[in-house]
Image (cartoon, rainbow, N blue to C red):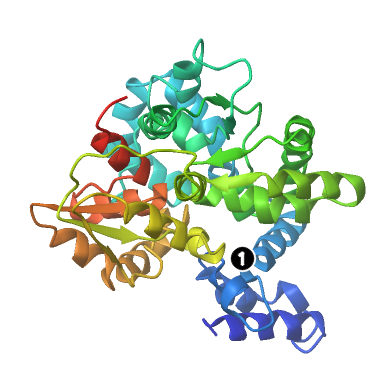
Amino acid sequence: MHSTRGRANVLRMAMAGRLGEAGLDEHGIKEVLDLCLECRACKSECPVGVDMGRYKSEYLAWQWARHGTPLRARVLGHVHDLARWGSRLAPLSNLLASSGFGRWVNEKLLQIDARRVPPAFSRDTWQEWFAGRTEKAPDVYFFNDTFTNYYNPHIGIAAAEVLASGGISCGLAPNVCCGRGLISQGLLGEAQAGARRNTELLYGLAASGATFLFCEPSCLSAIRDDVPALLRGEEQRKAEEVAKAALLWEEFVEREAAGGRLKLNLNQGPEEIILHGHCHQKSMGLLAPAQALLSRVPGAKLTTLDSGCCGMAGSFGYGKEHYEVSKAIGERRLLPAARSLKAGQVLVAAGVSCRHQVHDFTGKQASHPAVLLRSLLASL
């Protein structure tokens, strides 16, 4: 029942009335869907393209409409609002959230495992760094995602500086949150409103030939896959145009470097770069560009882990009921590889969830590709 085929068959049977009067309200369906990580691997690997992550979101939306939305779903779904206020109140918000008392409250109110240490908010945001630096007519626009802006602005800064070193000017797109948190928690009505807003804000730029770069793979997959699916008619057509203009940062940098339009002047790199691919990065076929880009680092051997999902899977790993299975998934390949890192080896992961999972269970740091390349620039 925990295979993609099993989950799909249970949903099909429920909708066909073969599970009795309860139908989709059958308690077992929630159990069947509970361990779906929404990794989107099934979308690319299933012969008929079953997208179980989307089915899970739609099922949750149906459940919340009938029985009310749980507090945890509301809080985790609105991660953008949480991050904005956490950033404004940092460092006090970080002290409270990471304290034993704060984690105890989270476990009691939200069933977020107290053994999890939440990621730290950044007082300074990526958007603030860009203020006064944005070009009047930038060559490319960064999508200002929640995780880079409020938690890891150093990643966005590094990504922009690598491009600047090659003569490519950058600006910030006038976007709102991509809706990944809302979608994963089944808050599809609000996600649809955000999808409309992003389409309104970005379509004009996309129609004029603009390119939107993403540092976070899960946000890119929301704009490429989920936003068009949430809309209909002319709005959907415009969303599809925006999706065509959206690229992962590594995808763009490798394309421009391969075409001779961006010169990467890099110093000698580490002895070995160990790459862990984000699930959504792999589901969109974007691991290869990252591999090609990191292979350009002088003197470095590239090893790609056969690691599957890191186990964090967005907010999945925070749940008290998921803590052990989240750890077990990571222990398959990723966490042992992180623990065994030696001098001269660097672990690279584009996903914020992946990096946090590594730090939570091993205390080691994984780097975003942009941060690694920025550290190796011969000049800026």
Query: Is residue 142 shown above or below 23?
Result: above
**Residue 99 versus residue 253 in the image, above or below:** above
- Residue farthest toward the bottom in the current orientation of the protein: 18
Tag count in the figure?
1
Front residue of 298 and 103: 298
Residue 32 screen position, x and y as percent:
57, 77
Image coords of residue 144 (percent x, y)? 55, 32
Residue 265, by quadrant, is: top left
* Placement of 58 over or under 71, stated as above or below: below
Say above or below: 269 vs 210: below
- Decide: few, some or many residues near mark 1? Use Cα within 10 Å; few <14, some 14-19, many ≥20: many
Residue at point 33% right, 29% down?
Answer: 94
Decide if residue 298 is in sight here.
Answer: yes
Judge by depth and name the residue closer to the eye, 249 or 99: 249
| Whether residue 71 can be seen here | no
Residue at 49% x, 24% y: name it. Answer: 85
Q: Is residue 273 or residue 164 the one in the foreground?
A: 164
Mark 1 sits on what residue?
A: 53
Q: Which residue is painted at 50% across and 48% down in the image?
A: 259
Which quarter of the rendering shows the C terminus?
A: top left
Judged from this view, the residue extending furthest toward the front is 260
State the image coordinates of residue 159 (x, y, percent, origin top left).
41, 35
The amino acid marked with disc number 1 is Gly
- Check the picture and name the quadrant holding the N terminus: bottom right
